[in-house]
Image (tube, helix red, strand yellow):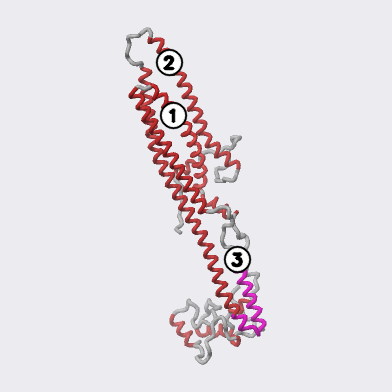
Amino acid sequence: MAAVVNYSPPWWVNLLHRLPHFNIEFQVVSSDFRPEDSEYQKSILLLGSVALLCLGLDLIFLLFYSFWLCCRRRKRDDSSHSHTHSQQPSPDCCCTAWCVIIATLVCSAGIAVGFYGNGESSDGANRLAYSLRHANRTVSGVEKLVTDSALALNQTVEESLVQLETAYQEQKDYVSIVQKLQGQLDELVRLMVDVPFWSNTDISLEDLARKTEAFDFYRWLGYLGLLLFDVLICLLVLFGLIRNSRGTLIGVCLLGVLTLIISWGSLGMELAVAASASDFCVSPDTYITRVTKENAVIDQGTPTMNYRTSDQTFLQFFVIPKHMHESQNANFQNPRCENTPLIGRESPPPSYTSSMRAKYLATNRPDQNRRSVPNDQLDPGSRPHPTARPQSSVH
């Protein structure tokens, strides 16, 4: 999975994030993404209510404008009785018609922007669903690797330890060491099982991705219908002006008010969602890290392996005897950093060169008459005496 280096949010994300967040008492609160905080929720709702405030102002303006038109029409009707032979349209009528035409063109441009924004929102929701599924595959992959690794340890190391215990069942010291190794293996398996970092089973990323796609589909379909309805209203306005149909214009006005209410309401909801999403996108790592720590199953303060306090006796089982270590240093004429090579390997540690490996094989060639013994069933005679405590280089 490729990591994004030097992530920088878009300009509009920073713009929405910089919007002031106020609570009900109109006190400034932090704009950090905290969806579980009641104060943050109130601030987001207050941002969305700005659109409702604009809707109220718009309806009040239309109401007063309608009253003004009615008063103007009454005065015009009174003056028309004294000029019955005048057939010229009044200037107010022409001005209103041109204002309606200009408003219709502006609304058409807004509808075009709405179509573009609706498509971009759908594309962003699809990318979000893909990211959720990718994260779900990552978590599932971690769980699968942990399960396979634990199963492999139980199938390989456990069997080898059982063979060692069977081979050294007459030597109590080695049997106790093997038993300690079995305890260490059980502890390692337990720690590996605890590696999956997500313990909240109530939240499924796959289900969240499906719900996101379903919600975005219905959102896209609803906004598409609303935009097409706006286009229909604009066409009816132009048709009513061309045909000078009073009934058409009155019906368009009623539909326009209904559309205005729906549009401003959806704008308030979209503003609240966009503001909260921008607060998250400005610094997503902060929220994700905090949620992961809250749902983590591993205590971050507990080390995975405590080598300082663990019993070091089981390490002696794999430590090369001192006389072999001195012989190796004499052969290679310099001390090597690999002081604990695996016993039973017929090759030096991996960092040796080819010439040093050849010298190692020449000076440590095994006896051909001796039966080959696997690494997990070594000859007890090659082990140091139980009372001998060779120095280990592992600290």
Q: Is residue 309 left or right of residue 8?
A: right
**Mark 2 and 1 residues: CB-CB less than 8 Å, in contact?**
no
Give the CA distance from mark 2 to mark 1. Answer: 24 Å
State which tag comes first along the sequence, 2 or 1. 2
Give the CA distance from mark 2 to mark 3. Answer: 84 Å
Residue 102 counted in the magenta span? no
Compare residues 19 and 297 and report the one nearer the observer: 297
**Mark 3 and 1 residues: CB-CB less than 8 Å, in contact?**
no
Q: Amino acid at mark 3?
A: Leu
Q: Is residue 354 left or right of residue 140?
A: left
Q: Crowdedness of circle 1 by 10 Å Cα count: few (<14), some, many (20+)?
A: some
Q: Quadrant of residue 105?
A: top left
- Residue bearing mark 1: 255
Image vertical order of residue 96 relative to residue 184, above or below: above
Q: Residue 110 at x, y = what percent?
A: 40, 35
Using the rendered image of the protein, determine whether residue 219 is visible from the camera's viewpoint: yes
Q: Amino acid at mark 1?
A: Leu
**Mark 2 and 3 residues: CB-CB less than 8 Å, in contact?**
no
Compare residues 361 and 122 and report the one nearer the observer: 122
Q: Which mark is residue 191?
A: 3
Q: Amino acid at mark 2?
A: Arg
Give the CA distance from mark 3 to mark 1. Answer: 65 Å
Residue at horizontal 33%, vertical 24%? 242
How many marks can you see?
A: 3
Q: Magenta segment range?
A: 163-188
Mark 3: secondary structure: helix
Image vertical order of residue 334 relative to residue 49, above or below: below
Using the rendered image of the protein, determine whether residue 300 is visible from the camera's viewpoint: no
Compare residues 287 and 147 and report the one nearer the observer: 147
